[in-house]
Every structure is written in C-alpha cells, then in structure tokens.
Amino acid sequence: MSRQIHIINKNQKSLETILSIQNLDKKYGKVHAVNNLSFDIQKGNVYGILGPNGSGKSTTLGIILNVVNKTSGNFSWFDGKLSTHEALKKVGAIIERPNFYPYMTAVQNLQLICKIKGVSYDKIEEKLKIVNLYERRNSKFRTYSLGMKQRLAIASALLNDPEILILDEPTNGLDPQGIHEIRQIIKEIAQNGTTILLASHLLDEVEKVCSHVVVIRNGVKLYSGRVDEMTASNGFFELQADDQNKLKQLLESHSSIGTINSENGVLIANLSSELSASEINKFLFDNGISLSHLVKRKPSLEQQFLDLTNNQ
Amino acid sequence: MLRLLTIELHKLKYNRASKVLSIIYFALLTSIALIAAIKFDIGPIKFHLAEQGIFNFPYIWHFNTYIAAIFKFFLLLVIVSMMANEYSYKTLKQNLIDGLSKKEFILSKFYTVIAFAFVSTLFVFIVSLILGAVYSDFNEISIIFSDLDYLFAFFIKLLGFFSFGLFLGILIKRSAFAVAAMIVWLIVESLIKGYLYWTFRNIKTGTDEAVNGIMQFFPLESMANLIKEPFTRLGAVKSVASQIGENFTKDYSVSLFNITIVLIWTAIFIYSSYALLKKRDL
C-alpha cells in the first residue's frame, strides 16, 4: 500500500526536500543523545524513525521542532527558505503526550492554534469530524479520555493542511481500539499524499505505513533508506521433504545457500546470493528430492531491525 | 503585535481563575470611590473624608494612583499563573511546535503586561476624573490636568512589577513558588535596607541619604519610590503636624531618574526571561 503511494507521488512531483538534517549532535551533560545524525526527508514519502526506547528519536524530533537546543550540526526546513518557526506553521506535529489547555473546549483549543498558525477557523469543523470528535467539540479538554486527547492532537496537527505530519509514538498508551483508530487515521492521511514522519518503537506500526525508514540506536544512525532494502539479505527458504538429512546435504552443496538451520522440522536456508524458488525446486528435484513444503521469504522488519541493532 | 496580544487574550479569556481575579482587581479599583462615602457623624464630630481635600485636583492623581497600586497583587497572580501554567500544562512546548517563536512567545506575554498596565491606568484616570469632578474644590481645566505624571508613574510601576512577576514565573515555573519568591525578595531587600541603616548609622552626611542612594537601585524599592506616600502632603495632616511641631519638607514629585531605573529593570526582566527560555530544553 504505502509503496504504491510512494511511486504515484514520485511520478507526480519532482523530488523536493522538506527537511534536511546534517551532522546533528545533542549532548545532555555526559549523555550523547544524538550523535552525528544526517538524513533527508523528501516530499510524498512516509518515513519511520525506528529505535529502541531512549535511542534519541524524541530528542531529534524535539530539535527540528524548536523545543530542544542542538549542541552542534544543522537542519533546514524546505531547503532553508524559511526560518524554523515560520516553517513549523506548515508542519503538523504531535510529540509525546497531547498538550492542550485543560480549561478550554476542543473548539477553543483549536481556535488558539489557528491564531498561532495564522490560518482561518474554517477547517476546525472538518478536522474534528475526521477524528470523530465533532460530537464532543464543546466539552472541556480535561474531560477527555487519553484516546480522545490523542485524536484531538491529530486534528490540531491537520488544521493547516500540513506539508508534513510528524508523529512521535502516536499510539503510546492507547487501548487496542484507540490504536486501531489512530492507525486508520494515519493511513487515510498517507493516502492523500501527505508526507509523514513517524517515530515509533513498534515495528508492525512502521511496517504497515512506512515506505522509508531511519534506524537509530544510542543516537547513531544505523540505516536510512527504503524499508525493503534495509538489510543486504537475499531472503531465505523454508523447506521440508520426507528425507530431511539428504535435503540438508544437497542444500549445503549448493553455492547460493549460506547457513542452514532447523526449526520445528522445517529447514531454514539463508541465501548468500539471489536464487528463485523454481530454481531451487528444479535443482532438488533433479537430485532426487521432492519437496512437501517450499516457501521463499524476506526477513520481517522485526528480524531486520534486530539484526541491525545487534550487529553493530 | 495585535496577533500576539489576541493569542494571549484567547488563553486568558477562558481561564476562570484569571477572569475572577481580573474582575476583583477592577472592582477594587472602582471601590476607591467608596472612600468618598466614609463619613463619621458622632454628635458634635462631623467628619466626611471626601471633604478633607483628598479628591481635590491635582492631589487626587497622587492619592488615587498610590491607593490603586496596592491592588496590583491581584493582577500579579494572573500574570504569574499565565506564565507558570504554560509550563505545568506543557502548552509552551505545544505553542512552539505550532510555530510560535520563543521571541514571539515572550512578546505575547509582555504585550499582555503592557495592556494590563495600560487598562489599569486608564481605569484609575477615569475613576479619579469622575470623583474629582464631583468632590474637587478646583475645577479649572489647567488644574485638573496638572500633575498627570503620577498616572505615568503608575503605569511604569505596574509595568515593572508585572515584568518582575513574569520573569519569576518563567524562572520558577510554579505560580505559588513564584509569588513566594517575590515575597522572599521583598524580605531580602528589607534586610539589606536594615543592614545599610546599621552600617551608615554614624555617617556625617545623613544616614537616610546614604541608604536611599543605594536602595533606589533595587527593583522593588525603585518601584515603591515612583509614587511616594501622599498622606503627609494632605492639607489637614500638614496642619496637624505643624501644630505638634513636625515639619515635612519632602519632595513628592515623580523623578525621571527613578522612572529610568524601573524601565531598566523591566528591560532586564523581559530580556532575562527570553534568554532563559532560549537556553532551556523543553
């Protein structure tokens, strides 16, 4: 899904850099929260920032959103055409918990944001409907549940029809119902071609919506690029036959096959170079083995992520 | 500028505590008029305060601005909490993310302080004008509009005081502690003053002059000096004093030097607030 969107957008617009980060550094005393981080955000893509808790995701977002001071390095919005706070008027962002004035209603809070961003009140009703809060629009913010607060935060981030939507752990602390609702909303926004930057430690979340990913650990960038090109892996086969021992011997003799493991009676053969399922099937059949089970898989994002964060 | 002011007023408008405090404040300002109603009528002793000359132009400007300045603590609470709330609700962070710069954020607060000081001054002006029109013995235009520098001093006094409150709100981030810090600072200034009196007790040129020469540079003292107490200036009090052999020779006028000191403190407070905000990670 997300990949299709990416391709469509790429055809429509020439690549336009929305955000560029160069050699960004942040130290909190001795803690090196962000270490020489560089990456670019292009228009129309959906980016995920992946990293374990405390890896520097939120700090990075805090820096580009003008609430955390960088120690060194640079970042520029929209090719440096706008100052940071002017650029932020074209950005929609939610970081950590939703922060609004508890004594104001949803509508009053959104009106305030319209004033700050310098846009008219026209969109308030529409955005409240998108996040299903229209019925509760005149309730005070302090009466909202966490899920409703998070949805109001999304509505506020959408008020200016942003060029880019930045979400930091948008489903954190929500119940399954709430998580589903938020993901649904994010998917709809992505389908409209809005650039999204999503920070999360939840891999399936990123896998479901993102086309590109930046992986960081301890403030160091481990990978940035397309989700499906994250590891150099050529994938692996799951194989099963009546004579597992002979199957294993044959596989070991094949030049394209690397390590072989056995899991629950199924052989897992990792590929060291490109090899199609039909080629391996033909090779085995010619050598007198008929398979009862053959699947070619790419490693899951979770597997890739763990490989990346463990190897380095 | 108007945009920043409307942003801040939007935040205050819906806050019940701020609204109640502001209403109490302006009600108290109006209540100065109630002094006019003070009357004793005990047999032979007839005393009507309004007829003792306190509402005579131009003395009324001095008297009313002095009394009105006492009520500024109500607005101080509003101002300190409008700053500290941004921290406790974490909305400061959200404001910045939404595209307000740190400079704009401080300016929106400062403009609100100016607006509060200005509206207060206007209010005192109108109330005094009406009271004077009713009770003053002199009604010539030239007398009515003389000594208006007390109103200007009142405005500067509020501006300096509220800027101090704003700064403490940012520095301490909690309303109650910020107000407490203001009180602590007042005590500190008093202690320093006491210490100076003790140090200079034997000085030949006069202890008062030496102490005031130093104390006038402290923030709260300089604000207090802007409008000197008006009571000993009152005709009735003066005549009583001269009967018992006291003679007041005091300069009651508003000094330009004093105004400059308070304006410099205001600039220091606002700039430090900005510097503090700029330096902090939120």
Image (tube, coloured by chain):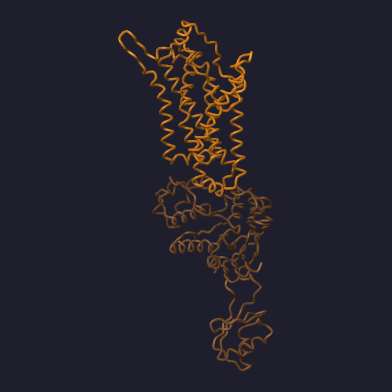
x 41%, y 32%: residue: B23
Q: Nearer the viewer, residue B2 or A311?
A: A311
Q: Nearer the viewer, residue A162 or A230?
A: A230
Relative image position of residue A121 (x, y in whole percent): 48, 48
Relative image position of residue B145 (x, y in whole percent): 51, 17
The colour applied to the residues of chain B in this rendering is orange
Q: Is residue A47 visible?
A: no
Q: Is residue A36 left or right of residue A111?
A: right
Question: Does A42 sit above or below residue B188?
Answer: below
Q: Quadrant of the N terminus of chain B?
A: top right
x 53%, y 30%: residue: B161
Q: Is residue A23 visible?
A: yes
Q: Is residue A46 left or right of residue A107?
A: right
Q: Nearer the viewer, residue B253 or A189?
A: B253
Relative image position of residue B249 (x, y in whole percent): 55, 10
In the picture, which chain is brown? A
Question: Does B47 sit above or below residue A183?
Answer: above
Relative image position of residue B124 (x, y in whole percent): 46, 24
